[in-house]
Amino acid sequence: MNGILRLTFRYLAYNRLKTVILILCVSLALLLPVLLQFGVAQFEQDLLARARATPLVAGAKGSRFDLALQSMYFSRAELEPTTMQAVETIQETGYALPIPLSLRFTAQGAPIVGTTLDYFDFRKLVVAEGTGLRRLGDCVIGADIAQKQQLKPGDRLMSDPLNVFDLSGNYPLKMRVVGILGKAGSPDDNAVFVDLKTEWIISGIGHGHQTVDSETSKDLLLKRDGQRVVANAAVPQFNEVTDENLASFHFHGQAETFPISSILLVPSNEKSEVLLLGIYDAKNATLQLIRPTEIVKELLQMVFRVKQLFDMNTLLVSVSVGLLLALIFLLSLRLRKRERQTMFQLGCSRSTIWKLQLSEIIFILGTSLIIVLGMAAVFRVYAYQMMRFLFIE
Amino acid sequence: MIQMQQLRFGYPQSQFRLNIPDLIIKEAEKVAVIGPSGCGKTTLLNLISGILIPDQGTLNSCGINLKTLNDSQRRAYRISRIGFVFQEFELIDYLNVHENILLPYFINGILHLDQCVQDRARELAASMQIDQYFQARIDQISQGERQRVAICRALLPQPQILLADEPTGNLDPANKRLIRDLLIEHTARTKATLIMVTHDDRLLDQFERTIDIERFHEVVETA
């Protein structure tokens, strides 16, 4: 081994506590800005990619950020619902393909996305295992949720109750998993997709129960008026759609009044997009139409402002760490003065004396850099999940 | 081996002056340098080793006029031809005994560490009876053993001149004589010149010559 390297390693090993503390200090000082830079870049890239793939979003007037983030990322937000009437209105204009989304429930913590089959074509989602949605009560799940919950086609997945203490509210629905989507590298990987009607059944708008007729026990009836009977709440409802009870499921009310959370719009062309924006730009419009890219850019502006504060803080911390390190190295130089004097007297070359001191600094900086790069590499792999957790969920 | 003529040396802004009209130390000679503190004993060693440069006069060592050498050449001269033994041993605490002995080979590229050197280091350590501590840390051995490690370090590059600056100053009487005898024995074996500074008159009997540096010492009045 080279003499300088041997002396350096021996010195660092002999003073191992000091070495470890210095390496940790430098690593931490470098790590924060590097991770922040990676994280923000990843965040920007992911957000913009999803936003660019989502031309327009319509929803009830309110928070534009909530509307954009829920429609793209299925994040939890208390959006004012709109109705299927809005979907039909947009459909009638012929300017865009409306894809309704209803996002109110979860299953095992994953968002249940009530939508139409157009969504899968729009997002280019393919079923990797099993089939697509075939009937009421079916669900197709994303690759991540399938892996996390160890689900495969044929398994059952129960929706989560909104409030376990609300006995008169919606009841969980046991859904049949019919397909697993291929990995998309997007929020779709962690979502449970159902038909809109299934989502309405979960919400209690539709339900299925045993046949109620004149033969039905009077304990289950609220009123009997000749051949017309009215069931009471004691009539047991089905919590799972099966081939046998499928026909009994029905909805109360007009379909156009049923709620949805938002609508993804796929305009026919740029002109149609502009026309649509014009239609919904009116003050008396009940819907708002947003361009997700604009919302995401606004969101990123806020993130960058926060990042600037972090950058300033990091700069100050780095300067103070740098000064402390300089102080430590100066003290180290002073402590090793006698050692240098001995080496000089023995005939140590001038360059060797400085190489010895510098190699200590280079080793500490180099090791810290390797640690930072290693951690940054790990962070890059999990950056998407971390940034999503921090900023979206 | 070492020849000084009309040599004058003084430290800047100091009353101390060393004035050596003529001094010759022969090859393989064993010389003790004595004199009171501050009279220039260590200065003489530093002049011979090329650490200090005379203000006037000539200083030839090993056939080299030291005044003609630049800094790099003086360091090369020192590492290859001079061995240093210090009163405080000046061993490196983060190196073990073996590595301390090899230190000159780590700090100047002029010396090449090979198997022959490694073998010689082991032989030297064995002759000084410290080979059992080869892998030990410096703080695990006694003062006398530390000085023997320092002597091994000084002798390993096979110097032509061994300079010992009060090497027995921190040792008990038994170790003082042991260290002196080891220095004389090893320099006799390698035909190296030994110049040892000492304050202890009881150690002088084994030296061929004693130089009282006091006679070369001057104190001048400064403005």
Image (cartoon, coloured by chain):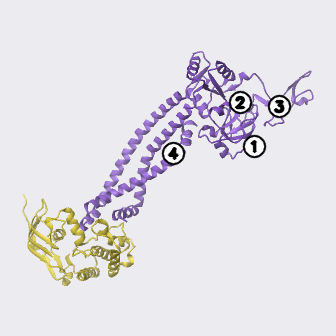
Chain letter corresponding to the colour yellow: B
Q: Is residue B197 visible?
A: no
Q: Which residue is mark 1?
A: A154
CB within 8 Å, label 3 to label 2: no
Residue A23 location (% of width, % of height)? 42, 54
Q: Residues within 10 Å of mark 4 (few under 14, many from 20)?
A: some
- Same subunit: marks 4 and 3: yes
Cα distance between the residues tagged 1 and 3: 21 Å
> Residue flagged by tag 2: what amino acid is it?
Leu
Q: Chain of mark 4?
A: A
Quarter of the image with the C terminus of chain A is top right
The local secondary structure at tag 3 comes to: helix
Residue reaching furthest to the bottom: B205
The purple chain is A
Q: Quadrant of residue B27?
A: bottom left
Q: Relative to B177, is B136 above or below?
A: above
Q: Which residue is mark 3?
A: A247
**Mark 4 belongs to which amino acid?**
Arg
- Whether residue B5 is visible here, answered yes or no, is yes
Q: Of callouts 2 and 1, which one flags the residue occurring earlier in the amino acid sequence?
A: 1
Residue A327, x across and y down, in percent: 33, 52
- Chain bearing tag 2 is A
Q: Quadrant of residue B217?
A: bottom left
Q: CA distance from mark 3 to mark 2?
A: 17 Å
Q: CA distance from mark 1 to mark 4?
A: 35 Å
Vertical placement of residue A344 versus B167, above or below: above
Identify which amino acid the numbered label 3 is placed on: Ala
